[in-house]
Amino acid sequence: MKIPAGQVENFLSAPGSVNRAVLLYGPDTGLVRERAKKIITVITEDINDPFRVTELNASTLKQDPARLTDEVSALSFSGGQRAIRIPDGADSLTSLFKDFFKHPVGEGFIVVEAGELSPRSTLRKLFESEKTCGAIACYGDEGHSLVQIIRGTFSKAQLDITPDAMAFLNQHLGGDRLMTRSELDKIVLYKGGESSITLDDVIACTGDSSTFSLDSIALAAADGNQDKLEEAIEKAMEETIQPIAILRSVARHFQRLHLASGLVREGQSIDQAVKQLRPPIFFKVADRFKAQVRRWPAPRLAQALTILTEAELDCKVTQYPAVTICNRALMRITQAGKSRR
């Protein structure tokens, strides 16, 4: 059963008819892990209870397929339902689960975590077709959902946040849920008992963090600066940021350039157009952004967005390495930006 995005939060608290297994997949590995822990906590109350939570990896299941049935059928010494967590799900496990679902046994609940799975993924198709199983896509936070996380974290700590600080976080967070929460927790700790979070506070806490990696890639590509792009991509890879998350971040940047460019064509000055963008452009990169609006005419922006969209699709439906597809697309865009300098 495919769980729609609007029903995910309710499902995580009460799986309902999905009483056999759930597959969590997507480029936001932090969100995958967070949701897995939430489901297991609903089932067992304590995710660290060794009598009620068992972790199996794919290599173990390949060597001993019967282990899955054994663990699902096992009874807990302390009573209650058990959870079986598989942190490295992949299509190689499809046949194993297909056989298990034909003859299900036991009362244990299976939680499978996986990376990005294309619509052609056999594992994803299997979980989406089984009525007693669920499949949930986990993509980076953005827009309203990211604002909710930011406000929720600070509200719980009884902290307010200024509009410019919120705009900054909204623009720099969201690629990975665990990374987002880590950065927000860092700000809460930094503020201590003070009541308001300012832009200076946010910059002081996140100025050297990995939250800038995606922004650096987008800016370097739009600048046409190949050296800076390669440095930013290398850093993103070290931080295990997924290629699709990179492509989407760059696409958002070019969409904002496209919007500003459209406002300029309607007669507004570049300064007026940029000021209308929401969330606002961070002041430290505002001049670079304005220069990019001048550098990229509307047809070139549309072409860049097409390249990014096609690259994301290729990452999902082809067998080529996603990293290679992502890098090739970004290099094409960077070359186009370089030619306009």
Image: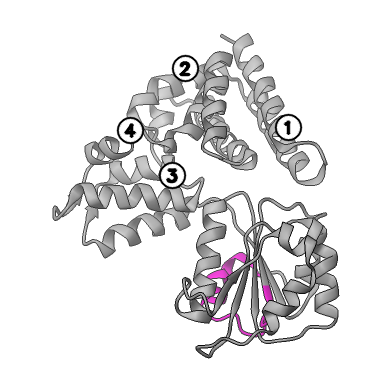
- Where residue 325 appears, as percent x and y from the top left, is 73, 32
| The residue stretch that appears in magenta | 3-21
Badge 4 density bin: few <14, some 14–19, many ≥20, Cα 10 Å: few
Left or right of 319, for residue 270 = left
Q: Amino acid at mark 2?
A: Ala
Residue hosting label 2: 291
Disc with the residue nearer the chain's start (3 vs 1)? 3
Q: SS at mark 3?
A: loop
Q: SS at mark 4?
A: loop
Residue hosting label 1: 325
Q: Nearer the viewer, residue 252 or 266?
A: 252
Q: Nearer the viewer, residue 131 or 148?
A: 131
Q: Amino acid at mark 3?
A: Leu
Residue drawn at the location 75% of the way across and 42% of the way down: 313
Q: Is residue 153 above or below residue 100?
A: above
The quarter of the picture where residue 309 lies is top right
